[in-house]
Image: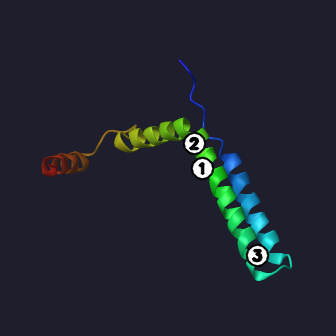
Amino acid sequence: MSRQQKPSWWKLYLLWFAMAGLLAWDYWTPSSDWLHRGVALLIVFMFCGMIAGWMRANRESLAHDDEEQKIMRQSPARDIPLTPVQVRYLKATQRNKP
């Protein structure tokens, strides 16, 4: 049985900060207007591609995290029993579901 790895979120955060830093650098460097736009577009497209690559590399672990979240939402663990009012409410909502 292989152990599921968690997505490397720190790499995604590093990409985001690098993109924001390069865009800030581009904003404060003196150059012509068309060059600013071209460099900004290049930075954004380059980092979108890098983020897409990160998502592709972490596809399995992201899907595993989604499944865990779905299971947690569907069956919350309870340490204490339901009150009679809660039981009645759950029965009423189950009857009204199609």
Residue tagged 3: 36
Estimate how packed mark 2 is, as few (under 14), some (14 to 19) or many (20 or more) residues with alpha carbons within 10 Å. few
Q: Nearer the viewer, residue 70 or 11?
A: 11
Marks 1 and 3 sit apart, C-alpha to C-alpha, by 24 Å
Residue farthest bottom in this picture: 33
Q: What element carries label 3?
A: helix
Residue 29 lies, in percent from the top left, at: 85, 75
Kind of residue indicated by mark 3: His
Name the residue carrying label 1: 52
Q: Are marks 1 and 2 in contact (CB under 8 Å)?
A: yes
Are the residues tagged 2 and 3 within 8 Å (C-beta)?
no
- The answer to which of marks 2 and 3 sits earlier in the sequence is 3
Q: How far apart are marks 1 and 2 (CA)?
A: 6 Å
Q: What residue type is labelled 1?
A: Ala
The residue at 48%/39% (across/down) is 63
Type of amino acid under label 2:
Arg
The answer to whether residue 44 is left or right of residue 91 is right
What residue appears at the point 57 percent right and 42 percent down from the top-left corner? Answer: 56
Q: Position of residue 83 (x, y in %)?
A: 27, 45
Q: In this view, does 5 lie above or below 47?
A: above
Q: Are marks 1 and 3 in contact (CB under 8 Å)?
A: no
Q: Is 51 on the left or on the right of 66, as rendered? A: right
Q: In this view, does 12 lie above or below 19?
A: above
Secondary structure, mark 1, is helix
Front in this rendered view, residue 34 or 83: 34
Number of residue marks: 3
**Disc 2 target residue:** 56
Q: How far apart are marks 2 and 3 (CA)?
A: 30 Å
Residue at figure coordinates x 60%, y 37% from the top left: 6
Q: In this view, does 72 lie to the left or right of 34?
A: left
